[in-house]
Image (cartoon, grey):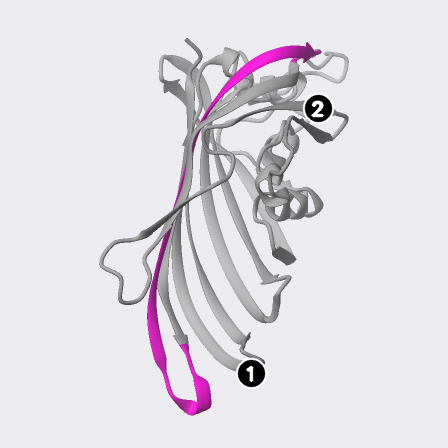
Amino acid sequence: DLPEILDVNINEGKVTFMPEGQEVPRDVRECEVRKFVDEVLEVQGTLPSRVRRKHTEWYKSAALPGEAEPLKSPYQLEGKTIVLRREGDKTVHEDVAGIPEDELRKNHLRIEGFLAGLPAEPVAVGAAWPIDSKILKEEFEGSEPGVLVLSLKGAGTLEKIEDHKGVRCGVLTLDLAGQTTFAEQKGLLMDLKLKVRVWLALESGRPLTMKGEGSSTASGEVEEQGQKVPLKGSFTRESGWVRGPDRSGRPTAPAARRRQLRAPASPPSPSSPLPGP
C-alpha cells in the first residue's frame, strides 16, 4: 500500500471591525485538512516527473459567529484522483475538468522554495544562509490563492543532525518575515512572522516532516457592501505535514545540495570536487 500524506493548517485569532467609530470584535478559527496518496508513474533524474494523486480527504472548517459547530466545507478534489506532470518548473494537471484553479495551484511537483535554496557549499551545524526572496514570493503566492506578497525575506539554519522516523535527517530551521495583502482587499495589510522546522532525509533528500508556527497582525480597511470599513486584528498560525517514505513521490532536494548538510569536520580543499547528483 502507498503511504498517506497529511497536511494540516490552523489559523485562529481575533479581528475587530470599526464601522463609524464602533468596534465590533469577531473571533476567527479556520482549519484545513488534506490527506492524499501519491503513486509515482514516471521519474526524470532524481525527481518524479509524473504522479497519480488521490485525495482521500480535503476540507476546510471555520467557526462562524453564532454557530455552535464549525462549518465544514469539502474541496471539489476530495475523493478524486488527478495526474500531475512536471514540465520544467511548472506542473501540468491531467483529468481535472471542472476543478477550480485555486485547488490545482495547491497540487504541484515543484521543490519547496526553501529546499531549492540550500547552500551550494558544505555547511556545519549552526550555519545560516539567506533564502531567495523571489523564490519565497512564488512559493507563498502559489500556495495561498488570492494573497499578494509585498515583501518577504527569510533565512535558513542547519540546527542539528538526528534520527527521525528511523532515518538520518538534517533539521532545518527557517525564519520568514514579510508583509502581504489580498487581490480582492488591497487596502488590508498583513505583517507576518513564521518559523518552520523541516526534517530532511540526508540519504534521499526527501523532506519527511514539517512543523510551522507564526503570528500576524492585520491593519487597514476592507470593502463591505460598497463601504470601506477600518479593521485591525491579530492571528496565530500552526501548520505541518507528514510525508511517507521515498515511494510517496514527494520531490527531493537536489542531491549535490542535500549532501552539503552532512556537516563535515572541515571544508573541502579547492581541488576537492563537490558531491555529484
| Residues packed near mark 1 inside 10 Å, few (<14), some (14 to 19) or many (20 plus) | few
**Which residue type does callout 1 highlight?**
Gln
Tell me the residue at 52%/63% (across/down).
Answer: 191
**Residue 211 visible in the displayed image:** no
Look at the image and give the residue range highlighted in magenta. 17-46
Tag 1 residue: 227
Q: Are marks 2 and 1 in contact (CB under 8 Å)?
A: no
Up the image or down, 232 lies above or below 110; here it is: below
**Which residue type does callout 2 highlight?**
Arg
Q: Where is residue 260 in the image (x, y as percent from the top left)?
A: 60, 21
Q: Position of residue 140 (x, y in %)?
A: 60, 46
Quadrant including the N terminus: top left
Give the numbered dot on residue 86. 2
Number of numbered discs on residues: 2
Residue lying at the far front of the rendered structure: 98
Q: Does the magenta stretch include residue 91?
A: no
Q: What element carries label 2?
A: strand
Q: Position of residue 153 (x, y in %)?
A: 61, 51
Q: Position of residue 48 (x, y in %)?
A: 64, 16
